[in-house]
Amino acid sequence: MNNLLEETETVKLQDPTTKYPAPPFEKQQEIPVPGEEKDLYPKADHGEESYRGTDKLKGRKAVVTGADSGIGKAVAIAFAREGADVVIAYLSDKEDEDARDTARWVEEAGRKAILFKGDLSKAENCQKLVATAVDGLGHIDLLVNNAAYQMAQEGIEDISNDQWDHTYATNIHSMFYLSKAAIPHMPPGSSIINTTSVNAYDPTPLLLDYASTKGAIQNFTSNLAQSLLQNGKGIRVNAVAPGPIWTPLIPSTMPNYKEFGDNTPMKRPGQPIEVSPIYVFLASEDASYIAGATIPVTGGRVTI
Ligand code: NAD
Ligand code: MG
């Protein structure tokens, strides 16, 4: 047995409703997209001080998109502490500092970190990301399709055709391009994990374009899962559906984030560290019979 706690220690019991900050949150100045970690007050918890790995992903080669900040950052840190090397993909120069911080945590865990900056709404950049991962790590065991775009709008008339196209290209087209490019480099036992949202079940009218991409991601996930198993690839595909999570996406795209998380039974948003363990689980051997599933992490919001 490999116990991390001493014989006499116990795991602290905590009430989940009071474990992390709850609204109202202070509205900061207008924040342009993509938001940065420094835009978040209070700061988000990515497990920097708390996540303890137990070799669940020892030796795995991972690609995580949107890994500079938010959920992707927490996933990259957890994967590295479980023993994986990580390609950290992100969008823009503005996020260089966030991405370097993620890389620092990955390296501190003793793993290799490779940074990749580029717009994944474009097929050629998705192919470049896969080529970078294969060059740097040899192959890919874990692909986490997590990057996304959203911008709240009052009604359908406020969503420009460009916004519609960009949301779809970023959120779902990239998932197709990346999966298609990566699968030939993924051995049996590998796993693809897609980030969908509670919006796939209970869409908010402020996010018509975004919410509908999340529904598409869920359908894509269950379909690709069946297809890869039936075609003998031995690759599992699953999705995670977060509820409201405290990340830079929120203050940069939501008008009323002061009350963010209030619409959950826990009356607070989740933190990235409360989502990342599910990605670890789905990526690990513990989930060997789970495919085509979506796991909700919603603070009690209903997803049936
Ligand atoms: P985030 O802003 O920290 O992460 C999103 C990342 O996506 C950004 O860091 C950015 O680098 C990347 N990105 C955006 N557009 C891109 C593009 N065109 N090309 C390449 N990269 C691009 O926010 P987050 O909340 O951690 O988001 C991660 C995922 O979680 C997204 O799929 C989001 O839809 C999903 N999600 C978030 C919430 C929430 O409340 N925060 C809820 C449900 C689902
Ligand atoms: Mg970011």
Image: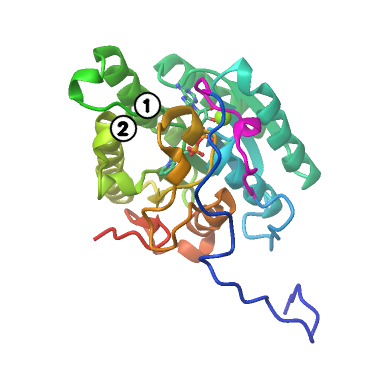
Specify the quadrant of the image occupied by residue 137: top right
Q: Determine whether 233 is above or below 168 in the image.
A: below
User: On the rendered structure, is 275 left or right of 265?
Assistant: right
- Picture quadrant where residue 18 is located: bottom right
**Residue type for callout 2:** Tyr
Classify the position of ligand 2 by quadrant: top left, top right, bottom left or bottom right. Answer: top right
Report whether residue 267 is seen.
Answer: yes
**For the magenta stretch, what is the residue range?**
30-46
Is residue 37 magenta-colored? yes
Q: Tell me the residue at 58%/54% (across/down).
A: 21
Q: Confirm or reject: label 1 Cβ below 8 Å from ligand 1.
A: no
**Which residue was labeled with disc 2?**
210
Q: Is residue 33 magenta?
A: yes
Q: Position of residue 283 (x, y in %)?
A: 51, 53
Q: Which mark is residue 134?
A: none
Q: Are marks 1 and 2 in contact (CB under 8 Å)?
A: yes
Position above or below: 160 against 268: above
Identify the secondary structure beneath mark 1.
loop
Decide: few, some or many residues near mark 2? Use Cα within 10 Å; few <14, some 14-19, many ≥20.
many
Whether disc 2's CB lies below 8 Å from ligand 1 is answered yes
Please tell me which residue lies in front, 169 or 302. Answer: 302
Q: Answer whether residue 138 is visible to the viewer in this image.
A: no
**Label 1: which residue?**
151
